[in-house]
Image (tube, helix red, strand yellow):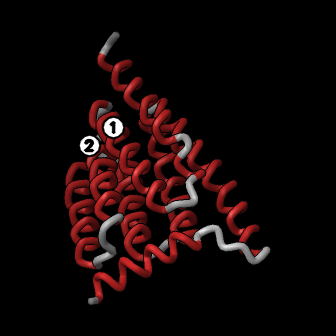
Amino acid sequence: MTYYWFAQSVGVLAFVVGITMFFNRSDRRFKQQLSAYSAIIGVHFLMMGAAPAGMSALLNSLRTLISLRTRNQWIMVIFIVLTLVLGLSRAHHWVELLPVGATVVSTWALFRTSGLTTRCIMWCSTCCWVFHNIWLGSIGGSLIEGSFLVMNGFNIIRFRRLQLRGIDPFEVEKKIVKKMEENQAG
């Protein structure tokens, strides 16, 4: 197996890990699975020679785990600055800016939003990753991000319909976020 196909197989592994992520109603499980997926796809991008995307994905992984413990604005700012510095310094083509921008926006979302708002922002971020991955020729990356786009889109619609019927699919999540914010404040 050539190095290229090995790198592509790592991308396919990321596809397998990430395919069920958006079905989680629990933000905690969603973020844990997102972190694992991000680490694997980050390695894939580095192997494919896409350093800005690889660094962004690896920072996504660490950022997502940390966002499980804190919603501190300073931590968010540190990750945004790291993403911009590491991603922009290695970019050689304008398309490489898309994953960097997507990471900045999703970082803000993971630290400052929850529930349906988080998923909507992640959907927009995914659009940037889809375009980048197709441009890069990443088989696994294109498959997974395309799948994320479709699955998260359907789940956004499903969760919104539940809300319109008076059912809050994120009730448990809201209690966890409130508790985290109370712990940080006092």
Which residue does the image show at 46% across and 37% down from the upper left? 17
Q: Position of residue 106 (x, y in %)?
A: 42, 63
Distance in Å between CA atoms under marks 2 and 1: 7 Å
The residue sitting at 40% across, 43% down in the picture is 37
Q: Which residue is mark 1?
A: 45
Look at label 1 and name its amino acid: Phe
Q: Sequence order check: which comes first, mark 2 or mark 1?
A: 1
Residue at image x 74%, y 68%?
A: 162
- Please provide percent x and percent y for residue 69: 31, 67
Query: For the residue labelled by badge 2, is the local secondary structure a helix, a strand or a loop?
Result: helix
Image quarter in which the C terminus is found: bottom left
Q: Is residue 66 left or right of residue 110?
A: left
Q: Image height check: is 3 above or below 13?
A: above
Nearest to the observer: residue 167 or residue 100: 167
Q: Residues within 10 Å of mark 1 (few under 14, many from 20)?
A: many
Picture quarter with the N terminus: top left
The number of discs equals 2
State the residue position of label 2. Answer: 51
Q: Looking at the picture, which amino acid does disc 2 mark?
A: Ala
Above or below residue 169? Residue 55 is above
Q: Residues within 10 Å of mark 2 (few under 14, many from 20)?
A: many
User: Horizontal and vertical percent for residue 135?
Assistant: 46, 39
Q: Residue furthest top?
A: 1
Q: Secondary structure at mark 1?
A: helix
Viewer-side residue, 31 vs 26: 26
Quick check: 169 above or below 151? below
Q: Nearer the viewer, residue 83 or 182?
A: 182
The correct choice, above or below, for 1 with respect to 162 in the image is above
Residue ranking furthest to the bottom: 186
